[in-house]
Amino acid sequence: MILVYYLDTSALAKIYIDESGTGWMQQLLVQALPQQLYLSHLARVEMASAIARRQQTGSLSPANARKSLQQFSADWFHRYTVVAVSSEIIERAYGLTIQHGLRAYDAVHLASALTVRSAFASLEGYALVFVSADQRLLQCAQQEGLRVENPLNYA
């Protein structure tokens, strides 16, 4: 079985910001091929925001914030397959928001993951794993039939 991973930003941030679950996420990044790691295009803005917020609160030094952002920007083009936020994903996210009471960006991430799963549905031997540190979002993903992983379980 070949595992394909969809990373929401709460999981993705752990690769670039040292926090609980970082080791597991960094190991996943090293072991997986870019064709196995999927992100929403939305994650680019969310990561910049997460790093900037941590710098503003003082939990990340300006030098470490710059380093994290540079590494993420370099990896963006070489380590991940980026899922465009299409009108279909927005419509699916709309329905997920109503069905599960999700926050808007969480619904976009879940809709993106479901779209990736659909793309692999006709291929034998592939399974999508939705990776998030948000327990509520993981529960919704499970209700939608996705396998899930929480990097906090490997802290």
Image (cartoon, rainbow, N blue to C red):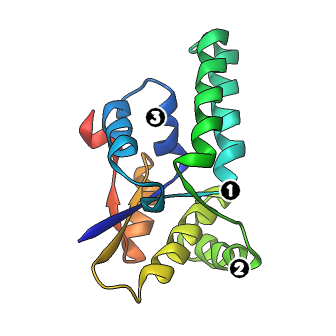
Q: Earlier in the sequence, mark 2 or mark 1?
A: 1
Residue 39 is drawn in which quadrant? bottom right
* Apparent side of residue 9 relative to residue 21 in the rendered image (left or right): right
Total numbered badges shown on the rendered structure: 3
Inter-mark Cα distance, 1 to 3: 17 Å
N-term mark: 1 or 3:
3
Q: Is residue 11 left or right of residue 68?
A: left
Within 10 Å of the Cα at label 1, are there few (<14), some (14-19), or many (20+) other Cα atoms?
Answer: some
In the displayed structure, does residue 124 sit left or right of residue 12? left
Does 152 sit above or below residue 126? Answer: above
Q: Which residue is mark 3?
A: 15
Q: Amino acid at mark 3?
A: Ile
State the image coordinates of residue 35 (x, y, percent, origin top left).
47, 62
Quickly name the residue at label 2: 91
Residue at position x 31%, y 38% in the image = 24
Nearer the viewer's eye, disc 2 or disc 3? 3
Q: Residue furthest right?
A: 87
Q: Compare marks 2 and 3 and give the one earlier in the sequence.
A: 3
Instruction: Decide: is 116 above or below 3.
Output: below
**Secondary structure type for disc 2:** helix
Is residue 90 or residue 70 the one in the foreground? 70
Q: Position of residue 134 (x, y in %)?
A: 45, 49
Q: Nearer the viewer, mark 2 or mark 1?
A: 1
Q: Residue at x 49, y 82 (%)?
A: 118
Q: CA distance from mark 2 to mark 1?
A: 16 Å
Report the disc number at residue 41.
1
At label 1, the amino acid type is His
Tag 2: residue type?
A: Glu
Q: Position of residue 93 (x, y in %)?
A: 64, 72
